[in-house]
Amino acid sequence: MPLQIHDKLLLTGAAGALGKALRTRLKANCKVLRLSDLNDVGAAEDGEEVMQADLGDAQAVDRAVAGVSAIVHLGGYSVEGPFAPILQANIVGAYNLYEAARKHGVRRVVFASSNHVTGFYRQCDTITADHPPRPDGLYGISKAFGEDLSRFYFDRYGIETACVRIGSSFPEPKDRRMLATWLSYDDLHRLISACLDTPVLGHSIIFGVSDNAVTWWDNSRAKHVGYRPQDSSDVFRDAVYARTSAPDLSDPAAIYQGGAFVKAGPFEQ
């Protein structure tokens, strides 16, 4: 059960798939949930505020951050693609968000990082948060930047951050790779709640994954957060195997943890 210890919580990226999945769930964590996105999130419901903002617009981000006690930052460019939009949303946008947090005294951020920060590790590897980044593309690079930026804002200004390297968060796994990377919506909320509730967060890198039998990620460095996943991809294993073929082990997407992202691009600017 999440603790309602935040008066006002900001959720960026509220119009995205994960933002929509968390919109109702996060109301248990706060008295008022402020929803922000570049795109339309619809009308505010009970216990909500809506504030549209382009992450690349520093003044708009500043307005969205003003008056909140914590931020769940899901906003940004969420796929591999050309550098220009990734730069604005994920790099400039992350800087704008942390600068606004500094100015307004926000002390805690849950930053949606990505498994693509480490996508060029092999699927036969098991890694911890201590392994150095090996991004699998420009998107992964932008998330690695966000992790470093958040570390700087913790070391310099004391803003605590959980960098959650989200695996594959969908209603159910779509393919065999996702049997290792799957994160249920409920476990995503459990993880974010743990990051918001824990007395001392510090600067933590946490893999966003459910309790799957097959996994490439060791979350032992994040026990202080108290995240205990309750869902597992294992219940979908038979169905996934039945509808998919065995992986081609010469295909980079089957060799590396980043899957198809390791083969994406280059892109026209």
Image (cartoon, grey):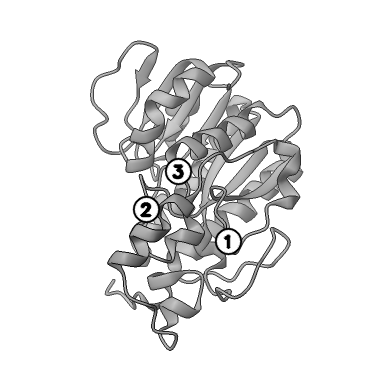
Vertically, is 218 above or below 68?
Answer: below
What is the quadrant of residue 127 in the picture? Answer: bottom right
Instruction: Please name the amino acid that badge 2 sits on.
Output: Tyr
Residue linked to disc 2:
77
Instruction: Please name the amino acid that badge 1 sits on.
Output: Thr
Residue occupying the point 31% across, 69% down: 244
Residue linked to disc 3:
184
In percent of width and height, residue 104 lies at 58, 25
Q: Quadrant of the C terminus?
A: bottom left
Q: Nearer the viewer, mark 3 or mark 2?
A: 3
**Can residue 67 be seen by looking at this rendering?**
no
Q: Earlier in the sequence, mark 3 or mark 1?
A: 3
Labels 3 and 2 touching (C-beta < 8 A) = no
Q: Nearer the viewer, residue 245 or 78?
A: 245
Q: Earlier in the sequence, mark 2 or mark 1?
A: 2
Q: Secondary structure at mark 1?
A: loop
Q: Nearer the viewer, mark 2 or mark 1?
A: 1
Q: In the visual, does 154 lie left or right of 231?
A: right
Q: Secondary structure at mark 3?
A: loop
